[in-house]
Amino acid sequence: MNASSQQEKSFAILLVSPSILVLLITTTFPILYLIWSSFQNINLSMPSNDGFAGLENYIEMFNDKQYWKSFKLTIVYTVSTVSLQLLIGLGLALLVLKIPKAQWLFRLMAILPIVLAPVVVGLFWRTLMLTPDFGIVDFFTQSIGLGSYAWLSEPKLAVFSVILIHTWQWTPFAFLVLLASLASLPSDLYEAAKIDRASALKRFFYITLPLIRPAIIIIVIMRSMIALSAYAAIYAATRGGPGTATEILNLYAYRTSFLEVNFGYGSTLAVFILIVTISVAAVLYSIRRKK
Amino acid sequence: MNKKIRDYILTTLATFIMLIWILPLIWSVFVSLKSEIEVLAYPPNIFFEPTLNNFKDAISGSLSIVSELGDSFLIATITTIFTLLLSIPAAYALARLNLFGKKKLGFYVLATQMIPPMGLVIPYYLILGKFGWLDTYHGMIIVYMTFSLPFAIWLMVSFMEDIPREMEEAAFLDKASRMKTLLFIILPQVKGGIAVTTIFTFMNAWNEFLFAVQLSGNKVRPVTIAMYNFVSVEQTLWAKLCAAALIAMIPVIIIGIIGNNHIIKGLTLGAVKGGGRK
Amino acid sequence: MSRKGKIELKNINKYYGKVKVLDDVNLEIKPNEFFAFLGPSGSGKTTTLRILAGLEELDKGKILFDDLDITNTSPGSRDIAMVFQSYALYPHMTVFENIAFPLKMDKVAKNKISDLVKQSASKVKIEHLLDRKPGQLSGGQQQRVALARAVVRQPKIFLLDEPLSNLDAKLRLETRVELKNLQKSLNVTTVYVTHDQEEAMTLSNRIAVFLDGKIMQVGTPNEIFNNPKTLQVASFIGNPPMNLLEAEIMNNQLIISGVKIKNYEIKKDNFKKIIVGIRPGELNISNDGIPAKIYLIEQLGDSTIMNLIINDKIVKLKSTENKNFKENSQVFVNINSDKIYLFDPETGLRI
């Protein structure tokens, strides 16, 4: 078999090398550059300081109050949106599951928020929904007597708003995946359970939930990755404001690098984001493999 | 009868929820058809005289976004073509062929997917700056490959793995070379997968914002930053903004509606056996 | 090189990790023979077939086609054709294109392809389906397409991996006959993998019985049926399979359940305990003999199978007589002593 497996190997290498080459150039090289930059002082506003900085940036990061604040905010943001997406998505999927004939319509409607550019979503919400005395949400709260609020300019409300926006856009993803997963469950399992006198609630917890576990895990993995790297929608809605109320790590790194042109420190923050993202992915993937 | 009534109630409830959910989108259509003055009316009007002026302004005139549309189209299309050309053969090799260090390569591709965009935009700004490739088409396309290629490879590998091995074995016995097997047997059967990959690659490139805003300038302006033509410190041209945004989003919305089955197949990959469609 | 179609497998050994899946397999298959690999799942028969095809590698040993060592050649250069269990039809091509594919790959002239495809299709009676796609065909029709695709190249060696197992019972029986005729008309050496011993018996010139990666016995269907070498082979062949009973030898007499078997003398006294094999058709119920209790009666219409309990074991009796026996009654069983097989309880070998 040697002749043909040698051929196979050469063919495989031929097919794969262009991609690997491109990946190395476009992803690995910049990351290495990023890591290198994080050990440098690259500040376009204070070029006299430029040069090797060792661990200075990292030490600065650990002492940086804004960094910790940002980090906490990022965690809150990620955990909230992913949980909300799961809960709401599951609820909607269970609801729509019972009406198979109309499902095509709901699937179509669910696609719409997902295909929009996040920056557009952020802009729409900022302008059309949340502007006091103008937006729909504000109009609604005024009409039911809750009054008008500074949805995007009051710090705590702003956090709530960006979480709302992100959840709005991505819950349909959870909905679609969960709906597909639920629809693929074989009905005879439920019939057997009904004969075994399991109540609807018990059937849900003992049969449904375990069986849709793969779907839930995928949703958690993918949505967490997206939440950690969220940028455009928040930028469009609040620019990280008011002040730094909605400045998740991503935006803080952005501000540091491009607005304060402190690329060295910004790189450090970005390296940290990279580490967090990869760690979260590793943990989640290992949970996935455990089944 | 009981079931029919229940279905009715559920359908109505679900439709109501869905409509509320896409209210922002619906409302943006309304606003885009209003005049700027109408838009400012509060409480907001549902009944008004619709006008197409905003769309006209978004297409022609000083605030036109047509050139940005062109830029986005160029960048997204070329990115998609390159991505397909690179990812399909690579996916076949990873999925099917006997490769030295296949697992490590697969892991590497997966790892590149994990890289957060912020981790790339900073070095790219510095690197492209050094090469003088900021604000260029080729600069943008290279950058766009960073998120397109790993994802496309991952998608195509999944689709290729679904093809039964026996089909390839039959082809070998029929004396087909590996290249011919790939072209005549494998590719026709992953047409659906190729469609999914094309859709996702194009859409992600079209909707991209971070790289677009940082690495572009005056010559190359993707449509996602064109929105900001209508937003400034003094005022926001609400109606025109909506019109422009809607125009910018039309391609992806159309793709979303027509390719809706493919998109769902792509989303549910790995989560549901058999792609989730009964 | 004259292509006769002789196959030789010499000392084939294969491991999956630490597990030995093929243990010193040696076979010689004659040209134009219809040769079956028979055995339960996991016995190594399919693995051996795939090694013949070149789809799996072997760890030790050689394969020769017509005295030529082809162990290291690729599947495409072995001049073999294979029908897979799942048929492996190309779903995006029409039946015509499926059958034409090997010819296309062989760079046969276009004008010839059409004729060859039609010929091949008519041999399996699917000429009317040439424009359809596999997804539009029934299981039986798909199977014929797979056959047509395999024979269109006029290979010298024809491999089939449980080709009938996906068909329903009636179709299986019909197709069996057609397969046999097809092979005869084609004059190809055919290797046929199956777990269905009836198929192997009715179709093949010779059978190799596989078990646990080893070949237990090679022979014609008659030889295997009448002269099984081990009790595993004996218990695998026959429907219902051979009964195996524990027995003792005392004073040169064979004793089962304390009853001396009439007219049976044994001169091998180095065995005290022994295993007796007797086919269901060679038992009958009489007035005395071995005590048994009728446990279950299966009526097949033209014959009856009685499940008896002898010594806490189930023994099957097949009879064409229609006596009225009742379940749960005690009876006596007689054995046709001409047809007894004796096996060593430790090695399983025939004595």
Image: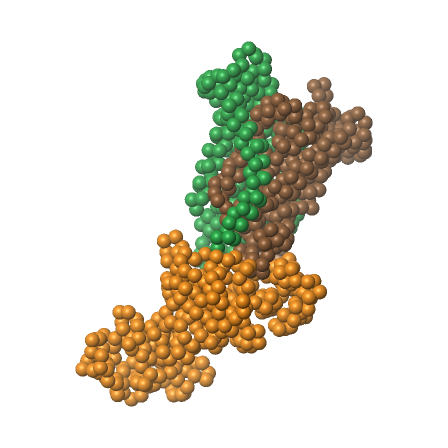
Is C26 on the left or on the right of B57, as rendered? Answer: left
Is B51 on the left or on the right of B156, as rendered? Answer: right
How many marks can you see? Answer: 0
Q: What colour scheme was applied to this rendering of the protein?
A: by chain
Is B229 on the left or on the right of A286, as rendered? Answer: right
Q: Looking at the image, which residue is at 36% across and 76% down?
A: C228
Q: Is residue A15 above or below residue B221?
A: below
Q: Looking at the image, which residue is at 81% across and 31% down?
A: B56
Residue A53 image position (x, y, % from top left): 48, 16
Depth order, front residue of A59/C254 = C254
Residue A245 seen in render: no
The quarter of the rendered structure image containing the N terminus of chain B is: bottom right
Q: Is residue C18 above or below residue B215?
A: below
Which chain is depicted green? A
Which residue, as the protein is rendered here, is positioned at the far front?
C1
Residue C330 image position (x, y, % from top left): 30, 82
Which chain is depicted orange? C
Residue C3 seen in render: yes
Residue C61 image position (x, y, % from top left): 41, 60
Residue C96 image position (x, y, % from top left): 66, 64
Quadrant in the picture for residue C351: bottom left
The quarter of the rendered structure image containing the C terminus of chain B is: bottom right
The colour of chain B is: brown
Quadrant in the picture for residue B22: top right
Q: Looking at the image, which residue is at 63% across and 24% down?
A: B131
Depth order, front residue of B221/C333 = B221
Q: Is residue A55 above or below residue C317?
A: above
